[in-house]
Image: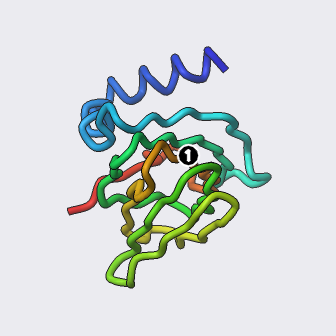
């Protein structure tokens, strides 16, 4: 796991994506990669990330190069997908986010919130792409 983090950090710094990600999530959001495995073909992989939001924290508009299933572990999060009405989820609820959908997430509870994000994405592409 440590080797994977070093490789990912090296790629992010080398491609200039590190600064974009740090600016996008800020100090009030922490993303911790929990697992990464080949999906069984030569194109995709499965990645699981725990995302911790401090009170009031918001992750700005972004997309992923594949689908995401967001499962709220604690607290209450509000998701905005494209131009659809916001979706508010509490612990134990989940949301399917289609590949390439521009979305954002915001902690709307009174304390911290966490989600388990499971991605099935194309390999060798940035996991998070900021959107206008």
Q: Is residue 128 above or below residue 85?
A: above
Which x, y percent locates residue 93?
Answer: 66, 66
Count every numbered label the image shows and give the total: 1
* Quadrant in the picture for residue 80: bottom left
* Quadrant in the picture for residue 49: top right
Q: Is residue 122 left or right of residue 20?
A: right
Which x, y percent locates residue 44?
Answer: 65, 54
Instruction: Check the picture and name the quadrant holding the N terminus.
Output: top right
Which scheme is used to colour this image of the protein?
rainbow
> In terms of depth relative to the viewer, which is nearer, 9 or 112?
112
SS category of the residue bearing label 1: strand
Task: Kindly give the residue lying farthest to the front in the view shown.
Answer: 110
Q: Is residue 44 left or right of residue 21?
A: right
Instruction: Check the picture and name the quadrant holding the C terminus.
Output: bottom left
Residue drawn at x 70%, y 60% is 92
> In terms of depth relative to the viewer, which is nearer, 4 or 33?
33
- Residue at mark 1: 114
Which x, y percent locates residue 117?
Answer: 60, 52
Q: Local crowd at mark 1 within 10 Å, few (<14), some, or many (≥20)?
A: many
Which x, y percent locates residue 55?
Answer: 38, 44
Residue drawn at x 38%, y 29% is 12
* Quadrant in the picture for residue 48: top right
Residue drawn at x 44%, y 43% is 53
């Amino acid at each position: 796991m440590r080797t994977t983090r070093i490789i990912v950090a090296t790629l992010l710094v080398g491609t200039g994506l590190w600064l974009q990600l740090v600016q996008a999530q800020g100090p009030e959001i922490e993303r911790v990669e929990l697992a990464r495995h080949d999906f069984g073909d030569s194109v995709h992989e499965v990645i699981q990330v725990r995302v911790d939001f401090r009170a009031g924290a918001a992750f700005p508009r972004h997309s992923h190069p594949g689908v995401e299933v967001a499962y709220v572990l604690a607290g209450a999060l509000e998701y905005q997908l494209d131009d659809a009405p916001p979706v508010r989820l509490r612990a134990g609820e989940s949301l399917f986010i289609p590949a390439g959908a521009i979305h954002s997430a915001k902690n709307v509870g009174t304390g911290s919130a966490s989600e388990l994000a499971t991605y099935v994405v194309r390999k060798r592409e940035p996991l998070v792409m900021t959107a206008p």
